[in-house]
Image (cartoon, rainbow, N blue to C red):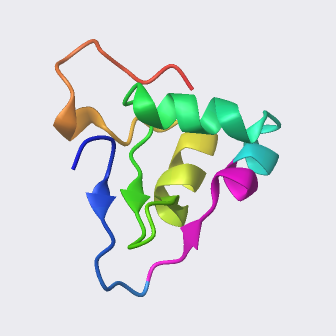
Amino acid sequence: MRGGEIVESSSERLLTPGEVAALFRVDPKTVTRWAAAGRISSIRTPGGHRRFRESEVHALLRGEDVLTAERPAGDAPRV
């Protein structure tokens, strides 16, 4: 599926675009654009809504590069 993965059973909390936006102090549509551009990974609910892993969001807030394994060297997210 383009733009995200299907939701897997996991005990990790998933955040909505609005919750992520509040943490970064941006508009929720900005978070959706980041996900579409691959700057932050997202998963999809069975209803097609985007959700973001809480651990990844907090790592980005701390300035950690959480997508390095999925990206070529030097192509860091610009969140």
Q: Is residue 47 visible?
A: yes
Q: Position of residue 41 (x, y in %)?
A: 39, 45
Residue 75, quarter of picture: top left
Horizontal placement of 62 versus 25: left or right? left
Which span is picked out in magenta? 12-20
**54 left or right of 75?**
right
Residue 65 in the image: state x and y as whole percent.
Answer: 40, 35
Q: Residue 39, can we see it?
A: no
User: Does the magenta-highlighted stretch encompass residue 15?
Assistant: yes
Query: Which residue is located at x 66 percent, y 30 percent?
Result: 30
**Front position in the image: 1 or 19:** 1
Q: Quadrant of the C terminus?
A: top right
Q: Residue at x 54, y 29 (%)?
A: 33
Quarter location, residue 12? bottom left
**Which quadrant of the figure has residue 10?**
bottom left
Name which residue lies at 43% across and 24% down. 77
| Looking at the image, residue 17 lies above or below residue 12 | above
